[in-house]
Image: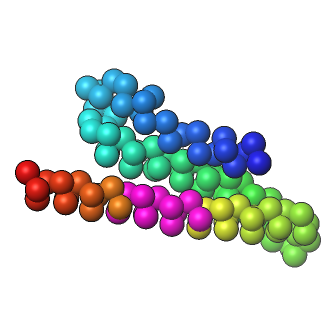
Amino acid sequence: MADEIQGFGNLSLASTLQGTNNKNRPGTWFEAMAHAWGQTLDAQAVKITELADQIGPGGEDKPSVMAMLTAESLRMNFMANSESTSVDSVGRALETMARKN
């Protein structure tokens, strides 16, 4: 469970927003949220790639590696859906607020 929580640790907007004048850093909190999600998804993709590299070409795959690859792939799917939903929801809310001003 600690790994799951730690995996979402990159979503700290406060740390992402610091140094917004740097070209590599986003300038608004909405951009910071998208940037943080991107970093989190990139880290998950690295985990999946590392597990995929452990799968042998000769068919001598360990069931434990296959199970972990499946689990991490499903986690990536969950995270990608969560990212899409959160960015879309916040974007729509900002659009609504902009129309009311």
Q: Does residue 20 belong to the magenta stretch?
A: no
Quarter of the image where one finds residue 93? bottom left
Give the magenta part as a residue range.
78-88
Please give the name of the residue rendered at 27% of the width and 39% of the height, measured from the top-left corner.
28
Look at 19% across and 59% down and name the residue there: 95
On the image, the x and y values in percent for residue 82 come to 51, 61
Residue 97 image position (x, y, % from top left): 18, 54
Q: Is residue 30 above or below residue 18?
A: below
Residue nearest the viewer, comparing 25 with 51 = 25
Q: Residue furthest bottom?
A: 59
Left or right, 24 with reference to 58: left
In the figure, 92 relative to 22: above or below?
A: below
Left or right: 63 as drawn, with respect to 84: right
Which residue is found at the position 8% from the left and 51% from the top?
101
> Which residue is found at the position 89% from the left and 63% from the top?
64
On the question of residue 25 being in view, the answer is yes
Q: Please, is residue 84 above or below residue 15 in the view?
A: below
In the image, farthest residue toward the left? 101
Q: How is the image coloured?
A: rainbow
Could you tell me residue 15's position as x and y percent? 45, 28
- Residue 86 sits in which quadrant? bottom left
Residue 50 placement, left or right of 16: right
Residue 37, percent from left and from top: 47, 49
Residue 53 visible in the shown view: no
Q: Main secondary structure of the magenta part?
A: helix
In reply to whether residue 85 is colored magenta, the answer given is: yes
Q: Nearer the viewer, residue 15 or 94?
A: 94
